[in-house]
Image (cartoon, rainbow, N blue to C red):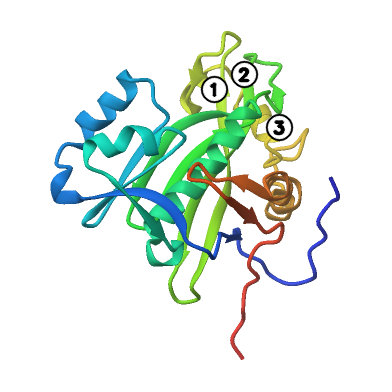
Amino acid sequence: MNKVQLQPGLYTNIFPVILPDEPVSFMEIQRAQATDLRELRNEIEQANRRVVVYADRNRVYGYGEDAETFLPAKGFGKTSVLFKQVPALATHVMLQGLLDAALAKGFWQRRRMSLKGVDARTEIFRPTPKGITVPGRVNVFVGYELRCAYYAAVEAFGLVVDVTWAYQDEHGAPLDPSQVRARNAMNEALVIQEELLRGTNRLNLQIAQIRVLNYLLPFAQEFQSIDLPCGGQAHLEPEPFPVILGG
């Protein structure tokens, strides 16, 4: 994997997402005809079918490997969707595709994907700890808080990536920051996170640059091509949107 070199300037933590321009096939039903999505999802789970249903405004969309065989009996019909016309659905399937790819690589998820408006969010962590503190034997995992959003002003999709951290004890049980402090391990955890300079209590003033170069750029490059659960692929650009300064 070649290391991405950014040109001098200021950058956001938002990576452009390129979704298919052509229509994508989904199953669809009017929301008024699918009043109990919880029951429908339970039926899908009990039947062990690979189907996802997602409600957006007055419609419910279905997709997945078994969608075309399972959903017609529930009143769904085939439709074609342009992603820019249904951005909430687009952000949902893009993040689901990224999540599926990450989990297949061994990443683990702390919070399930949630939806709000045209944003889809989740948190994932690398499978092995970045470091283990000597006092307290705390496993420090690096992760990524992900949010896919549609920016109507520029008619573009973007993936917002933030670095986040998780702690576990020697048995794999989660620890919160207060529990890490109780083990006298927080300072070393912050050194592993590169937020404190080793051997001192001084903050690392280069942490913002380190996060971009050592965490965000490699993550975006690792997941440049993402298979979408509805078919087709998304492309994640390896460089984030630059900050445009007004004159």
Query: Residue at point 33% right, 23% down?
Result: 45
Q: Nearer the viewer, residue 194 or 99?
A: 99
Tag 2 residue: 138
Mark 1–mark 2 Cα distance, whole angstroms, equals 7 Å
Question: How many marks do you count on the picture?
Answer: 3
Tag 3 residue: 192
The answer to which image quadrant residue 125 occupies is top right
Decide if residue 111 is on the left or right side of residue 220. Answer: left
Sequence-first tag of 1 and 3: 1
SS for tag 3? Answer: helix
Q: Is residue 39 above or below residue 241?
A: above
Query: Residue at point 48% right, 73% down?
Result: 155
On the question of residue 107 being in view, the answer is no
Decide if residue 148 is on the left or right side of residue 46. Answer: right
Give x and y (percent) for residue 63.
Answer: 40, 42
SS for tag 1? Answer: helix
Give x and y (percent) for residue 39.
Answer: 20, 29
The answer to whether marks 2 and 3 mark residues whose Cβ atoms lie closer than 8 Å is: no
Query: Residue at point 67% right, 16% down?
Result: 135
Say which mark, if any, is on residue 106: none
The type of residue carrying mark 1 is Val
